[in-house]
Image (spheres, grey):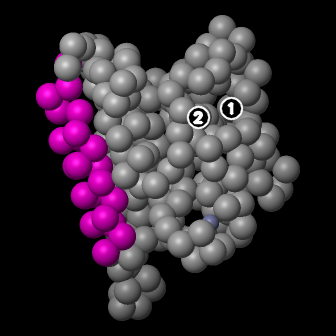
Amino acid sequence: MNKRIPAIPTKFRGINFRSRLEARWGAFFSLMGWDWSYEPIDLDGYIPDFILHMHEDVLVEVKPFMRLNDPSIKDAIAKIEGSGWDPKYDGIWPDRPAIVVGAVLFHHSYTNYNKSTTWHEVVIGSQAFHCEAELAILSECEPCCGISIRSQEASYSCMKCGRKKASSHLHRRNVQIVDTCWNEAGNQVQWMGRDS
Ligand SMILES: [Zn+2]
């Protein structure tokens, strides 16, 4: 089942990424307008792939999983929580949030009770939460004028601005923007090998 996918070191924008998938996430974060650093800190026995500089620093770990129940997610969360990063939840906002992202974006659509409206959710990964995994869902935030991330548990708090203004889902046009950014991120790193 879990065949190891070989990681191809990829140089992109002057940064040596350990894999093409990591480079793609960096390109995606930039296209989304999110500020990030690659491997900026050493934790206890563990170097996180990314820190997103949002309302709080958000740790991002990249694993090439294709399903949100992949066992590598829980392993990654155990590693993060064992490193001293320790995501906590005080009832309002998770302190030191951490997200494990995969090889794809996850789309969900669902209709409301009288089937008059269809909502779209794009899940970018799993959020570490007291040794469990919650979904990290893309959402719209009016105060910070853009697409942000909210956690399943953190009361619709926007990770970008910290306010409880995040929407529960994305409008169709924003789903298309996210898909376009993800595809464009793939294009940007497609031909970037070790020496390019
Ligand atoms: Zn916001």
The amino acid marked with disc number 1 is Cys
Q: Where, by quadrant of the figure, is residue 57 drawn?
A: top right
Q: Which residues are magenta?
A: 173-193
Tell me the crowding category of disc 1: few under 14, some 14 to 19, or many 20 or more residues within 10 angstroms, Cα based: some
Q: Judge whether residue 71 can be spotted in this image.
A: no
What residue do we see at 63% from left, 55% from top? 159
C-alpha distance separating marks 2 and 1: 20 Å
Q: Earlier in the sequence, mark 2 or mark 1?
A: 2
Q: Main secondary structure of the magenta part?
A: helix
Q: Where does residue 95 sit, x and y in percent of width and height?
A: 78, 43
Q: What residue is rendered at 50% in x and 50% in y? A: 34
95 to the left or right of 161? right
Q: Residue furthest top?
A: 45
Q: Can residue 61 be seen here?
A: yes
- Is 59 covered by the magenta stretch? no
179 drawn magenta: yes
- Image coordinates of residue 97 in percent, x first then y, are 67, 41
Count of labels shown? 2
From the image, tell me which residue sits under label 2.
51
Q: Residue at x 71, y 60 (%)?
A: 162
Q: Residue 173's spot in the image, x, y percent?
A: 31, 75
Where residue 5 appears, as percent x and y from the top left, is: 26, 17
Q: Give the numbered dot on residue 131.
A: 1
